[in-house]
Amino acid sequence: MFNCRKISELVSRSLDGDLSFWKRVQIRMHMMMCSLCRKFRRALLRIDGEVRNAAEQEFVADENVVLPESRREQIKELIESGQD
């Protein structure tokens, strides 16, 4: 049986749908006994839903926001150098 830390990792991965049948069964078994992991899963599903809803919304750029030229150059240099 997995501990809560492992379950939280698996629950997170399950949003991408890349878990085996047996791992999903183990998650369900753990969830039947652990209210904290159930709360974590509900919160994660809520966050995932909100992010998906936000991603579906049309992005409208604010034409009044202007990025200073110096900052544009910094960003350009970072992109060209491959750094974060």
Image (cartoon, rainbow, N blue to C red):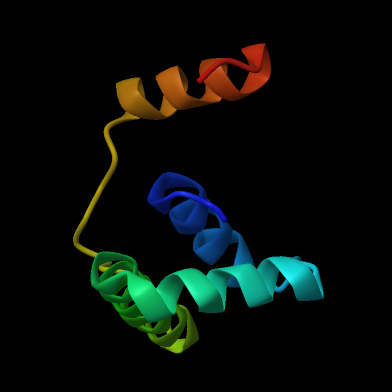
Which residue corresponds to the image point at 66% horizontal and 74% vertical from the top-left?
24
Q: Where is residue 45 in the image (x, y as percent from the top left)?
A: 40, 79
- Residue 48, position as x, y percentages in the image: 42, 75
Residue 49 relative to residue 19: left or right: left
Instruction: Tell me the quadrant of the picture where the N terminus can be found.
Output: bottom right
Residue in front for this viewpoint, 79 or 56: 56
The reply to whether residue 60 is in sight is no
Percent coordinates x, y for residue 26 in the rendering? 61, 69
Q: Residue furthest left?
A: 64
- As displayed, is residue 73 above or below residue 30? above
Q: In which quarter of the image is residue 74?
A: top left
The residue lying at 46 percent from left, 78 percent from top is 55
Q: Can the viewer see residue 70?
A: yes
Tell me: residue 41, above or below residue 78: below
Q: Which residue is drawn at 79% across and 76% down?
A: 21
> Splitting the image into 4 quarters, where does residue 73 fall?
top left
Q: Which of 1 and 37 is in front in this view?
A: 1
Q: In this view, does 65 lie above or below 14?
A: above
Of 3 and 63, nearer the camera is 3
Image: 16 above or below 79: below
Q: Residue at x 25, y 73 (%)?
A: 35
On screen, residue 71 versus residue 79, left or right, reads left
Viewer-closest of 82 and 44:
44
Q: Position of residue 47 (x, y in %)?
A: 33, 74
